[in-house]
């Protein structure tokens, strides 16, 4: 039997109709400046928590999103508040950055508040999980956030079910699910993507390719260079985004969002990025040993260096080139290419520092839940 071109060519990787401009070209100057502010906010959240733990004011494991902020900001910025997200442990800022475009202190915003997320991190009473976990195992039906789980890819079938129900009820919501590249090897990933593809569900799967599945390098995870090729077997688009360029992430995600909202089904978007620290702060020392040895032998060493570009620096250069900020503006607050212990509050815009400080101080003063709550949500009376 002859093999046709449609069987050998990969799915369309550019979802823009001919002649249509990139979605980012439609953003206003104010949108560009807000995107930069949100990158600063995501970075400062990470930096502040690391510093709080070193000061002894915070316990538990931290999973850093340092250097991966463009994936979060770029993917979230164009969503409607009524859209759903399914974050993972590396995406903690997503819980309070969802619908942030509607206003950081907008009480009607469909996302968790900075106080709620900080209470979750500190294990306090006003956390969504009522102190049953100190990190990302939370969610909110009213805020349209699917509960996170440690088994990455395990929420993709949940996400498919959520938007399937939304479609049956006449809605037009899409859902963004975030996953590490290692999770694409799990059976549940393939079962869920297949289900979404068959039913043309508006499920957009973000693959955060940061080169490491805990301590496993990508060449031991998948035989292909690009994880976006996972899409080929399901006949759905597989797009690749520069995970250090917030505007490229925005463009690729909005292409997929518009594709999904039009009833054309799911997509996979691989965001090539790099994990700045270990898997969690418990893995930092070990990661410092296993990564340089592997990187020295890696065939994609240039790709790693490319991904180590700081997304805040990339964004600033774009804004300077567009004339939206001056070089003096770009040099006013410089946190890029600095580790948490090398940064100071002065390296961030004052409104970013004040916003996080409010959340942190609220959480520190917030009480722990009463002991009688220990059995709550465990048994049903």
Image (spheres, rainbow, N blue to C red):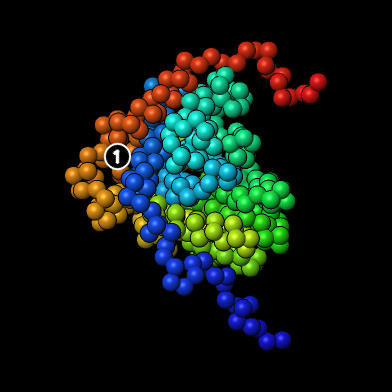
Q: Quadrant of residue 375?
A: top right
Residue 6 placement, left or right of 325: right
Task: Determine the residue positioned at 35% across, 33% down.
Answer: 352
Please state which of residues 96 and 103 is positioned toward the viewer in this rendering.
Answer: 103
State the image coordinates of residue 139 (x, y, percent, origin top left). Answer: 61, 35
Q: Quadrant of residue 37?
A: top left
Task: Determine the residue positioned at 67% across, 60% down.
Answer: 200
Q: Which residue is mark 1?
A: 335
Task: Determine the residue positioned at 67% across, 16% down.
Answer: 373
Q: Is residue 123 above or below residue 196?
A: above
State the image coordinates of residue 183 (x, y, percent, origin top left). Answer: 60, 51
Residue most extreme to the front:
170
Q: Is residue 166 above or below residue 89?
A: below
The reply to whether residue 271 is in sight is yes
Task: Determine the residue positioned at 49% across, 67% down.
Answer: 16
Residue most extreme to the right:
381
């Amino acid at each position: 039997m002859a093999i046709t071109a449609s069987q050998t060519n990969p799915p369309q990787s550019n979802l823009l109709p001919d002649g249509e401009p990139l979605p980012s070209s439609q953003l206003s100057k104010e949108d560009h400046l807000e995107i930069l502010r949100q990158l600063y906010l995501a970075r400062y959240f990470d930096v502040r928590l690391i510093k709080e733990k070193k000061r002894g004011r915070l316990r538990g494991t931290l999973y850093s999103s340092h250097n991966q902020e463009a994936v979060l900001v770029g993917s979230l910025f164009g969503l409607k508040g009524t859209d759903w997200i399914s974050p993972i442990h590396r995406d903690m800022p997503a819980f309070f950055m969802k619908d942030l475009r509607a206003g950081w202190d907008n009480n009607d915003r469909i996302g968790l508040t900075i106080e709620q997320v900080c209470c979750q991190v500190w294990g306090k009473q006003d956390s969504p999980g009522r102190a049953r976990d100190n990190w990302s195992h939370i969610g909110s039906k009213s805020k349209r956030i699917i509960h996170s789980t440690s088994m990455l890819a395990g929420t993709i079938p949940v996400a498919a079910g959520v938007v399937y129900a939304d479609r049956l009820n006449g809605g037009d919501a899409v859902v963004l699910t975030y996953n590490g590249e290692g999770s694409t090897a799990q059976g549940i990933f393939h079962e869920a993507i297949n289900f979404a593809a068959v039913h043309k569900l508006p499920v957009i799967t973000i693959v955060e390719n940061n080169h490491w599945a805990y301590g496993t390098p990508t060449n031991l995870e998948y035989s292909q260079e690009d994880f976006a090729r996972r899409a080929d077997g399901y006949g759905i688009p597989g797009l690749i985004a520069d995970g250090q360029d917030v505007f490229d992430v925005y463009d690729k995600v909005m292409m997929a969002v518009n594709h999904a909202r039009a009833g054309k089904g799911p997509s996979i978007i691989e965001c090539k990025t790099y994990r700045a620290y270990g898997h969690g702060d418990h893995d930092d020392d070990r990661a410092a040993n296993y990564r340089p040895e592997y990187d020295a032998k890696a065939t994609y060493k240039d790709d790693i260096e490319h991904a180590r570009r700081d997304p805040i620096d990339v964004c600033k250069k774009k804004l300077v080139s567009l004339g939206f900020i001056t070089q003096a503006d770009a040099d006013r607050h410089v946190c890029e290419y600095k580790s948490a212990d090398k940064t100071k509050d002065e390296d961030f815009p004052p409104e970013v520092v004040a916003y996080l400080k409010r959340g942190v101080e609220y959480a520190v003063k917030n009480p722990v839940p009463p002991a009688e709550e220990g059995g709550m949500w465990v048994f049903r009376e």
